[in-house]
Amino acid sequence: MSSLTKKLKEILGRVSKCKEKCAAERKEIAEAEKIADDILEALGEAPENKE
Amino acid sequence: MTYSRLLAKLQRIKSKVIPPEPPEIRGRIGNDELVRLYETIFPEARHCLYIADAYSEITAISEIRRFVDWDITNIFPYEAEIHDCDDFALALAGDFAKYPGWSGFPVTFIWGDLYGGHAFATAVAWRSLAERVPAVYFIEPQNDWEIAREQVEGIEVWLIPFA
């Protein structure tokens, strides 16, 4: 394997890990937003229309 | 995008959960004055007034209104006997009692024969920050509207506890 191919594989591996991390963070933010919606509803704010 | 939306929601929650800043301008009112003010409206009030503290704080009605507007006692649905007038009145008075900076003001529960038997809220406050004359106010905690003094004047009062 050429050193260039090796480097490309390394980069692709890092990108893949970043994507996984981003997806996990997006999921956490969506969960936090759902909790915020539930609290706002309990505090009398009408729930937002979901897109 | 999602993160900024979450932050905006957290800000809204904060504004609903944390009470408004307490009034900076406040004075003191003695129990004799409280009794006198209620007796002018309800001549037999003395026997149903229970005052726990040696004195109360006083501020302008606009400041009391600022808290009432923030408070969410009024949003909950009425349910006869289970969550009715006395519960609304206790909740609003209790919310004042709950928060430092607001608990010293004479805002409380009043129960009497309005509409044949009704509990609502009452407060003693200055007419304004400029005109520091104490007056009695009545608030309907189910919708936050003020009840006119003329509407309650002379009713039989059963209980006014001040804490």
Image: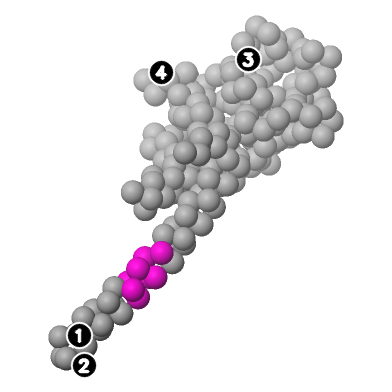
Callout 1 amino acid: Thr
- Disc 1 marks which residue? A5
Q: CA distance from mark 4 to mark 3?
A: 21 Å
Query: Which is in the foreground here, disc 2 or disc 4?
Result: 2
Res B72 visible: yes
Callout 2 amino acid: Met
Viewport quadrant of the C terminus of chain B: top right
Q: Chain of mark 4?
A: B
Residue B15 is left or right of residue B50, and the answer is: left
- Disc 3 marks which residue? B147
- Secondary-structure class at tag 4: loop
Mark 4 and mark 3 lie on one chain; the one further toward the N terminus is: 4
Q: CA distance from mark 2 to mark 4?
A: 88 Å
Whether residue A28 is situated above or below residue B130 in the rendered picture: below
| Residue A7 locus on image (x, y percent) | 19, 85
User: At x 38% / y 70%, what residue is drawn?
Assistant: A21
- Disc 4 marks which residue? B131
- Disc 2 marks which residue? A1
Callout 4 amino acid: Glu
Instruction: Tell whether label 3 touches label 4 (CB within 8 Å).
Output: no
User: At x 55% / y 19%, what residue is drawn?
Assistant: B135
Q: Which residues are magenta?
A: A16-23
